[in-house]
Image (tube, grey):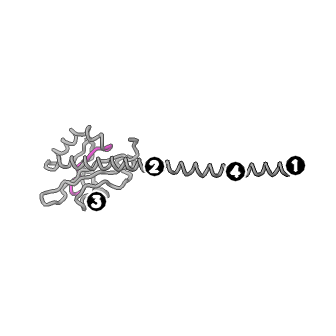
Amino acid sequence: ALAVAAALVVSTVLADLMAMRELRRSLAESVSRSLSVTVRRMAEQLDGDLAAMLALVRAEAGILENLRPEEADEVLRQRSSALGFAFDYGVVLVDDAGTVRADSLGRDWNGISLAGEEFFQRTFVSREGIVSEPFASPLADARPVAMATAPILDEKGRVRALLAGGVDLGRNR
């Protein structure tokens, strides 16, 4: 009778351990699926936000295309509150040499060179607006940033300037 009782206890413990193992596996799969859905939704939201920002910077470039840098600077400053809703770090006008010529937030960035930045080089070469790869911006305390850009072309189709708006990817939206 004692051996039967011991066998019953052992089989009950083994069954419980197997049930716990299956429960753990099931829970891990459920959490994994949930995280996957959440990450996919966040990525889709971010893609949509970045596409909207690219469209906005293209529209703004169209407004500025016939202005001199000092006129563009004034227009960008007047529109800074509207642009601030989309661009955490404002919008800058960059000439064909990569030098900042105007800034929507009125910072003392005129003369800063962005010629070595990936977003400037890609926009200049492609002559199309882009959303940059994320990077740690030295002008934004090394926070993760993406830039939406739009070229401003001359009558021969050459890039004479570009407009770039910065987005803080670490900010809760």
Question: Residue beneath label 1, please?
Answer: 1
Q: Earlier in the sequence, mark 3 or mark 4?
A: 4
Residue 74 % position (x, y):
18, 41
Tell me what residue is drawn at x 25 percent, y 49 percent.
55
Q: Amino acid at mark 2?
A: Val
Q: Disc 4 on helix, strand or loop?
A: helix
Q: Earlier in the sequence, mark 3 or mark 1?
A: 1
Residue 96 % position (x, y):
21, 57
Say whether marks 4 and 1 touch (CB < 8 Å). Answer: no
Tell me what residue is drawn at x 49 percent, y 49 percent.
35
Tell me what residue is drawn at x 24 percent, y 48 percent.
57
Report how far apart the C-alphas of labels 3 and 2 lie in the structure.
Answer: 32 Å
Question: Residue beneath label 3, please?
Answer: 122
Residue 105 % position (x, y):
27, 41
Report how far apart the C-alphas of labels 2 and 1 lie in the structure.
Answer: 54 Å
Say whether marks 3 and 2 touch (CB < 8 Å). Answer: no
Nearer-the-camera pick, 31 or 146: 31
Say whether marks 3 and 1 touch (CB < 8 Å). Answer: no
Q: In front of the other: label 2 or label 1?
A: 1
Tell me what residue is drawn at x 62 percent, y 49 percent.
23
Q: Disc 3 on helix, strand or loop?
A: helix
Question: Residue beneath label 2, please?
Answer: 37
Q: In front of the other: label 4 or label 1?
A: 1
